Structures are given as C-alpha cells and as structure tokens.
Image (tube, rainbow, N blue to C red):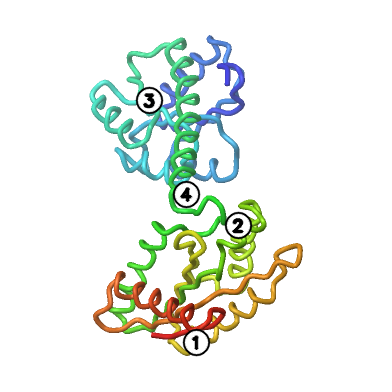
Amino acid sequence: MSENSMNTVLLIEDDPGDALLIKEMLEQEECKAQLVTVERLSEGLSFLQQNVCDIVLLDMNLPDSSGLPTLTRLLDTSPAIPIIVMTGLSDESFGTDAVKSGAQDYLVKGEIDGRILKRAMFYAVERKKLEIALKQTRDLFKRQARIDYLTGIYNRLMFSELLEAELQRARRYGSELSLIMFDLDNFKKVNDTYGHNMGDHVLKEVAQLVSDSIRAHDIFTRWGGEEFMVLIPKSDQSQAVILAEKLRCLLAAHDFGNGLQVTSSFGVTQFRVGDHADTFTSRSDKAMYLAKQKGRNRIDVL
C-alpha cells in the first residue's frame, strides 16, 4: 500500500485544535484519504463496526475513555486495523506501553509534522499486514503440527491433549468415557500388492468414512500407521461397542477401488476410576490385539 492508496483514516480526537492540525498536515502532504474525525471512543467504535477503515489515529485521553483501556477496547473491536497512538508531551510513556499492547506506533503531538505523520501511517499499515501474515503462518504451522498430513484428522499429539482434557472431565464429573482402537487387517498386503499409493488412498478413505459416521464431539485420530482411535465422551462401553460394530461393518463392506476390501479389528474399553492416559489407551490396544488373535474383523472388549 502506498501513502496515497489509503481510502479512509479515522481520527479519534476530542481536541478541535489538534484535529484541525492533523487535517492540515495530511492535506499538505497530499494525502487523498478521507479523514473521518470523532471525539469519543464510543463514536469511533460505532464507525468501525459499520465502515471499512485503513488506519486509526487515536488520542489516548478521551471524554469517555483514557489510558491503555482506550486502546484495548479498540483492538478488541477491530484487531486487524493498524492503530497509531497520539500522546501529549507529558504522556509519552503511555505511547511506549501502547505499542507493547498492540498499537503499531505512537507519535508525540508536539513533535510531529505532516511528513512524519504520513510516513508513520504508511509503515503502520505495512507492519500490521506483516503481523497478520505472520500470525496466519504461525496458526497454519500450529494446525499442521496437530493434524495428520495424510488423512486430515487429528494426529497422536493432538489426541493426547484432547484425551487428557476428557479424562479430567470424567474424573471431575463422573461422566462416562469410552475408547475405540482399530487397526486395518493385513494392511501390509495392500501396500505390497497394490502399491503405497493405493495404501494411502485406503487410509484417507477410512478417515473419511469414519469421520462421516461419528458425532461431532467424538474425537477421531490416526494413532500411527494403519491404527486409529475414536474417543467417545458421554458414552458407556455398550454404546461404544455399538459404534464399533457400525464402523466395522461399514469398512468391511466398502469398495476401496478395483474390488479391494479391507477389514478391521476393534478394541473397546471404558474409563475406570484410577485410569490415566497410558492405562486407558493400553487397555484398548490389548483388546484390539485380542480381536486380531481371534481371527480379525471382530470386536473385543477389556
């Protein structure tokens, strides 16, 4: 964004003399943006809720708000808009605190001219764009760190965090909590016979089929390789077995392409007093291996 490509500048300033001075500075620098001036924070918040604005010039002391809460309220309403705080000579320390709290810059009223103001506005807009881009990148990396790259469902790291939260809830409120673990039977043969691309396709199809068949608050994860977990809050063991049987039949009957069908073995368990993450998941794992030892494509419970 160039200095002359701003469309709207909001000035929140209750001193008419200071407001006029800002207006004259921008005109002298041939800033073509529309300058909207309001005297109260409430008026500024109302304007931002109804209009698009490129930048806000904010006096820290207004009739209806003063100090850092003025900035905080503005940031809460419009977190994506860059803000330059303007302070008096005696309030310069407020400016430093404001930048630490989220403002892009601060200017001391008695020390600015049109050139300084125009440049500060340009850099504030550019810094805010960079700040937003960096946050989006961090959020993406954070999400990727918790999502399985192949299937798009939760990975083991994220599941561990959610499992601990559900265990705490079950302990505190005595609520029911059940866990299903399942493994695709003879999956190595799929990779060996059809290739790893087909194996990846099967894993993605399984993830989609199960995701479409569980409740929104059930927690589904790829535990590792061809192993999956479904954590089922507010459900006892018998309800978990019903869901496991539904999923077992669904997967066994599905054509994954070229007539390929894959069965799965399921282990089911319910939260018990004294359980922690390791005992809970280990019990479902043991139940699943019992199902494999007994012939696969079945459910066992521990």
The amino acid marked with disc number 3 is Asp
Q: Earlier in the sequence, mark 1 or mark 4?
A: 4
Q: CA distance from mark 1 to mark 4?
A: 31 Å
Of callouts 2 and 4, the N-terminal one = 4
Q: Nearer the viewer, residue 18 or 55?
A: 55
Q: Contact (CB < 8 A) between labels 2 and 4?
A: no
For label 4, the residue is 143
Which amino acid, mark 4?
Arg
Residue under pointer 3: 105
- Is there CB contact under 8 Å for labels 1 and 2? no
Residue found at x 76% / y 63%: 258
The residue wearing badge 1 is 239
**286 relative position to 129: left or right:** left
Q: CA distance from mark 3 to mark 4?
A: 31 Å
Reply above or below: 158 against 229.
above
The residue depicted at 47 percent of the width and 69 percent of the height is 229
Q: Residue furthest right?
A: 258
Measure the C-alpha gap from mark 1 to mark 2: 33 Å
Q: Is residue 216 left or right of residue 73?
A: right
Residue type indicated by callout 1: Gln
